[in-house]
């Protein structure tokens, strides 16, 4: 075995490590979203201390029957409506769909999962 050469096993481990780190980041985000949910008899967390994910979930909880488009959600939350910001939120909503918190019955439409 020569020093300085990487075997294919090391590349597989590097790829597996990257996949695990990405999954851990998703789990951390999910934990923050769940921590931000409040029971009806508790005071909500002030908006200044909440993450964008928490604010998104709260908006869906406060309007459970509404089907949101990303731009409408941005306007409701007072977020910037430039295209890069919209795309980041679109990605976040996709993640919340995969986690089972939201549905996506049509392109760009997101209701709360019931």
Image (spheres, rainbow, N blue to C red):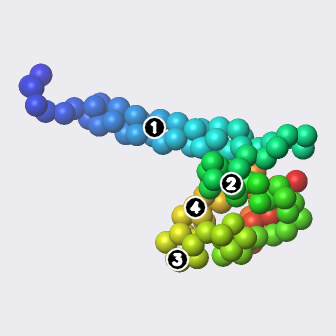
User: To which residue does mark 3 refer?
Assistant: 83
Q: Using the numbered discs, state the Cα–Cα distance from disc 4 to disc 3 in whole angstroms.
A: 12 Å
Q: Earlier in the sequence, mark 3 or mark 2?
A: 2
Count the marks: 4
Q: Earlier in the sequence, mark 4 or mark 2?
A: 2
Task: Judge depth for marks 2 and 1 and give the one in front.
Answer: 2
Task: Judge depth for marks 1 and 3 and give the one in front.
Answer: 3
Q: Earlier in the sequence, mark 1 or mark 3?
A: 1
Which quarter of the rendered picture does the N terminus lie within? top left
Q: Above or below — where is 89 with respect to 33? A: below
Q: What element carries label 3?
A: helix
Q: Crowdedness of circle 2 by 10 Å Cα count: few (<14), some, many (20+)?
A: few
Q: Which of marks 4 and 3 is nearer the N terminus?
A: 3
Q: Earlier in the sequence, mark 2 or mark 1?
A: 1
Q: Above or below — where is 81 with respect to 97? A: below
Q: State if disc 3 and disc 4 touch (CB < 8 Å).
A: no
The one of 37 and 97 positioned closer to us in this rendering: 37
- Which residue is found at the position 33% from the left and 36% from the top? 14
Q: Using the numbered discs, state the Cα–Cα distance from disc 1 to disc 4 in whole angstroms.
A: 18 Å
- Quarter residue 91 falls in: bottom right
Q: Using the numbered discs, state the Cα–Cα distance from disc 4 to disc 2 in whole angstroms.
A: 21 Å
Percent x, y of residue 103 = 77, 59
User: To which residue does mark 2 refer?
Assistant: 47
Label placed on residue 21: 1
Q: State if disc 4 and disc 1 touch (CB < 8 Å).
A: no
Q: Using the numbered discs, state the Cα–Cα distance from disc 1 to disc 3 in whole angstroms.
A: 28 Å
User: To which residue does mark 4 refer?
Assistant: 91
Q: Is mark 4 on a helix, strand or loop?
A: helix
Percent x, y of residue 10 = 28, 31
Percent x, y of residue 77 = 69, 66
- Quarter residue 26 falls in: top right
The one of 69 and 1 positioned closer to us in this rendering: 69
């Amino acid at each position: 075995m020569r020093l300085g050469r990487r075997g294919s096993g090391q590349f597989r481990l590097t790829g597996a490590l990257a996949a695990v780190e990405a999954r851990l980041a998703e789990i951390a985000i999910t934990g923050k979203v769940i921590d931000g949910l409040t029971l009806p008899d508790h005071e909500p967390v002030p908006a200044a201390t909440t993450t964008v994910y928490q604010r998104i979930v709260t908006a869906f909880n406060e309007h459970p029957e509404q089907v949101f488009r990303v731009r409408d959600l941005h306007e409701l939350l007072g977020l910037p409506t430039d295209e890069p910001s919209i795309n980041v939120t679109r990605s976040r909503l996709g993640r919340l769909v995969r986690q089972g918190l939201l549905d996506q019955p049509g392109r760009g439409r997101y209701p709360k999962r019931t």
